[in-house]
Image (cartoon, rainbow, N blue to C red):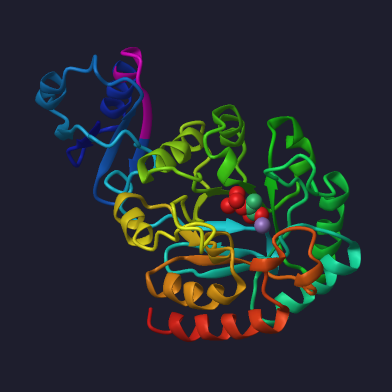
Amino acid sequence: MIAVLKSGVSELQKNSLIKWLEAQGVGIHLSEGQYQTIIGLIGDTSRIDIDLLNGLEIIDHVTRISDPFKCANRRFHPTDTVVEIGSGENAVKIGGGNFAIIAGPCSVESEAQIIGIAQDVKAAGATLLRGGAFKPRTSPYDFQGLRGEGLDLLRKAREATGLPIVTEIMSASHLDMFEDVDLIQVGARNMQNFELLKELGKLRKPILLKRGLSSTLKEWLMSAEYIMSEGNENIILCERGIRSYDPYTRNVLDLAAIPMVKELSHLPIIVDPSHATGKRSLVESMSMAATAAGADGLIIEVHNDPEHALCDGAQSLTPSQFSTVSAKVSEIRKLF
Ligand code: PEP
Ligand code: MN
């Protein structure tokens, strides 16, 4: 539910209304614009008497939002959210017209590998470096990632190139190891790990929230809501394809999710054409399509030696292929 105040309402009137609402057991999200103050009521609003609220002298109007996501809802926050990652001269913005490419290997494998790829993707236009240290593999017998050592190597690559680092967290118990990670990724398999989401909500660090393997847009936005309702609004959504029945591609890239999510939410949305297709040959066309559909960025797997990659080699581009994709994407961005 959202309550729009009349203009000219005093601080005292506003605060006493907020106190009264809080006493009824709802959380408050205040949005104070230049012309309008909007009070978002979070949680169980079923006990709020909408007619009573509407009748108050200081209220312009009250709307019940049928969508269960409030913090992530564009109706309540009409302007695009811009998420800033990293700091200083290498800080990167995503959303609200700011487009960025995240690139790097599926997994961090060695110092030479991650630093070499970081330098290559930076030269080709990527402004953030990805690399998995904790890998959510379907089989426990597959490479599980270099874990803490992988995070150290990512830090070294950041030092060498200045690129902010993006890497996946799999458990809230690892949070202290992720303190200086610039953008924490929640993978598809953890999209509904609600305890993890709540812990990430207590941070003020940017979170990259991937869409679950078979999640609806509403479920995905509700996961964003878990993080936001704890106070962390720095969320970037990532469409990475959803399960279907056709074995030719790893997943089905839901391109319509990009404009649909933009209608529903103010959060930035980027696309992962690598996991969406599972095939190197499809990454260029899907990167261009996602960019044309209005994505705020891309996350692309790049490996110096894809044939020998420890994870996801089949969908990884070589640095020179990445360079071509990056150049084509920047041509498409000129249309925006
Ligand atoms: C990844 O980014 O390496 C990854 C495991 O992605 P997803 O969670 O989308 O499968
Ligand atoms: Mn991967």
Q: Nearer the viewer, residue 308 or 66?
A: 308
**Residue 22: quadrant of the picture:** top left
Residue depicted at 67% across the width and 67% down the height: 314
* Residue 226 located within the stretch drawn in magenta: no
Q: Nearer the viewer, residue 171 or 160?
A: 171
Residue bounds of the magenta highlight = 21-29
Say whether residue 44 is visible: yes
**Residue 136: quadrant of the picture:** top right
Query: Dividing the image into 4 quarters, which one contains the N terminus?
Result: top left
Is residue 80 left or right of 108 when viewed as pictured? left
* Residue 23 located within the stretch drawn in magenta: yes
Residue depicted at 29% across the width and 34% down the height: 39
Say whether residue 206 is visible: no
Is residue 281 left or right of 36 when viewed as pictured? right
Residue depicted at 50% across the width and 73% down the height: 287
Is residue 336 left or right of 36 when viewed as pictured? right
Query: Dividing the image into 4 quarters, which one contains the C terminus?
Result: bottom left
Q: Position of residue 222 (x, y in %)?
A: 41, 36
Q: Nearer the viewer, residue 46 or 209?
A: 209
Q: Position of residue 307 (x, y in %)?
A: 77, 71
Taking the image in four quarters, ligand 2 sits in the one at bottom right
Tell me if residue 164 comes above or below residue 148 in the rendering. Answer: below
Residue depicted at 47% across the width and 50% down the height: 243
Q: Where is residue 84 in the image (x, y as percent from the top left)?
A: 57, 58
Q: Position of residue 68 (x, y in %)?
A: 31, 33
